Image (cartoon, rainbow, N blue to C red):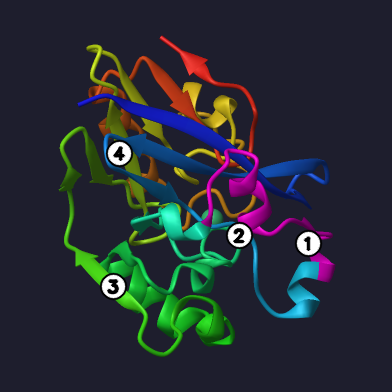
Amino acid sequence: MTLEIRRLQLATLQGVDGNEWPVHGFVVRFTGGAALVDTGVGGPEQWLTSWRVVNRSVAAALDELDMTPGDIGLVINTHLHFDHCGQNAVFKHAPFYVQRSELSRARTESPQLTGWFDFMNARFELLDGDADVLPGLRVIATPGHTVGHQSVVVDAGDGTCDVLIGDAAYQPRQYLDPLSDELPDGQASDVTAWRQSLGRIRSVEPDRVHFCHHTDIVHS
Ligand SMILES: [Zn+2]
């Protein structure tokens, strides 16, 4: 099966280094459908203000691809931070593929976000570790940023492989140098697990790594 990745520019916010960071989601198109990886920013107004969010609607971003939210058959959330699941409610028709441990973490740590990811009748496909989602599309558990973080592996169908890394690395620098002691605030809630997860991602031998908060693509 041929899969095609398209990046969505969903927002900017003030990153932990004080610079402006992009917020990306990714559409994975395949024969007969499409999946969305992360839905962009949403949350209480004071969060958006303090992160200096300049937000876009995910529907507007999809429109640039001549797509509508109804074209998205399933959503994968790499994790449930407000800049990755903030517009889940736009996709009430779709199942949300989330690690079970991540849903439980977010329910405990972020009850303020209930209306954004844990709304009435939200349909979760709860995962316990690595899982195949569709032919050519799978997730691997990459805990460390959060306890239930996952990254997405796309086998494009031409023998090459892409990783949508989520926040397992904010930027290429953390991916390329995981042993650095200079981790940005919030990069790792568990540094040991975080480093092991970057090793897991490398073991996939991705040809391209795509970031949520950086526009560079790491080629290898
Ligand atoms: Zn995050």
User: Real-space Cα distance between discs 1 and 3?
Assistant: 28 Å
| Image position, residue 132 (x, y; %) | 15, 45
Q: Does the Cβ of the disc 2 residue fall within 8 Å of ligand 1?
A: yes
Quadrant where the C terminus is found in the figure: top left
For the residue marked with disc 1, what is the amino acid?
Answer: Trp
Secondary element under disc 4, as helix, strand or loop, is: helix
Which of pointers 1 and 3 indicates the residue nearer the eye?
3
Residue 196 is marked as: 4
Q: Would you name the residue on which mark 1 appears?
A: 51
User: Real-space Cα distance between discs 4 and 2?
Assistant: 24 Å
Q: Earlier in the sequence, mark 2 or mark 3?
A: 2
| Image position, residue 55 (x, y; %) | 76, 58
Work out which residue is located at the far top of the displayed protein and give it. Answer: 220
Residue 124 is marked as: 3
Which of pointers 2 and 1 indicates the residue nearer the eye?
2
Residue closest to the eye, 56 or 59: 59
Callout 2–callout 1 Cβ contact below 8 Å: yes
Instruction: Residue 51: say if magenta.
Output: yes
Residue located at (82% from left, 41% from top):
19
Residue 83 is marked as: 2
For the residue marked with disc 2, what is the amino acid?
Answer: Asp
Question: Where in the image, quadrant-wise, is ligand 1 located?
Answer: bottom right
Q: Would you call the spot at circle 4 few (<14 residues within 10 Å), some (14-19), or many (20 or more)?
A: some
User: Real-space Cα distance between discs 2 and 1?
Assistant: 10 Å
